[in-house]
Image (spheres, rainbow, N blue to C red):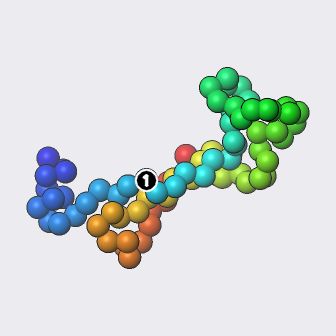
Amino acid sequence: MERHRAREHGLSRLRLLLTVDSYEWRSDSGSWRPLPTAGGAGANDPTGVAVGNFGKLNVFACPQAPAHPHRFSVQ
């Protein structure tokens, strides 16, 4: 119902534009790692960027009007 109401008013849902994660991969997970991985302390944090409490930042944009302000979510 909310989606239908948004369309009636010419509104669109925000779309995920960018995700910035504190880590390139999670050291406690074997889900994905670049090859070759040298390992060692800090190998999964090459940039040193820490988002919030070492989480991730999601940036959302309006697909209908790029001039609309972006929205942010830190997880």
CA neighbours of label 1 inside 10 A, class few (<14), some (14 to 19), many (20+): some
Q: Quadrant of residue 68?
A: bottom left
* Residue 74 percent across, percent down from the top left: 55, 52
Identify which amino acid the numbered label 1 is placed on: Leu
Q: Left of 42 or right of it: where is 53? A: left
Q: Is residue 42 visible?
A: yes
At horizontal 13% and vertical 52% (from top left) the residue drawn is 4
Residue wearing tag 1: 16
Q: Secondary structure at mark 1?
A: strand
Q: Number of numbered discs present?
A: 1
In front of the other: 45 or 56? 45
* Residue 45 percent across, percent down from the top left: 77, 44
Residue 33 position (above or below residue 6): above
At horizontal 17% and vertical 66% (from top left) the residue drawn is 10
Instruction: Report the residue that reaches farthest toward the right.
Output: 40
Residue 30 position (above or below residue 65): above
Q: Left of 4 or right of it: where is 23? A: right
At horizontal 60% and vertical 52% (from top left) the residue drawn is 20
Instruction: Report the residue that reaches farthest toward the left.
Output: 8
* Residue 57 percent across, percent down from the top left: 57, 53
* Residue 27 percent across, percent down from the top left: 74, 30
At horizontal 37% and vertical 71% (from top left) the residue drawn is 66
Residue 48 position (above or below residue 71): above
Q: Left of 46 or right of it: where is 70? A: left
Q: Is residue 53 visible?
A: no
Q: Left of 16 or right of it: where is 30? A: right
Instruction: Report the residue that reaches farthest toward the bottom.
Output: 67
Instruction: Report the residue that reaches farthest toward the front.
Output: 36
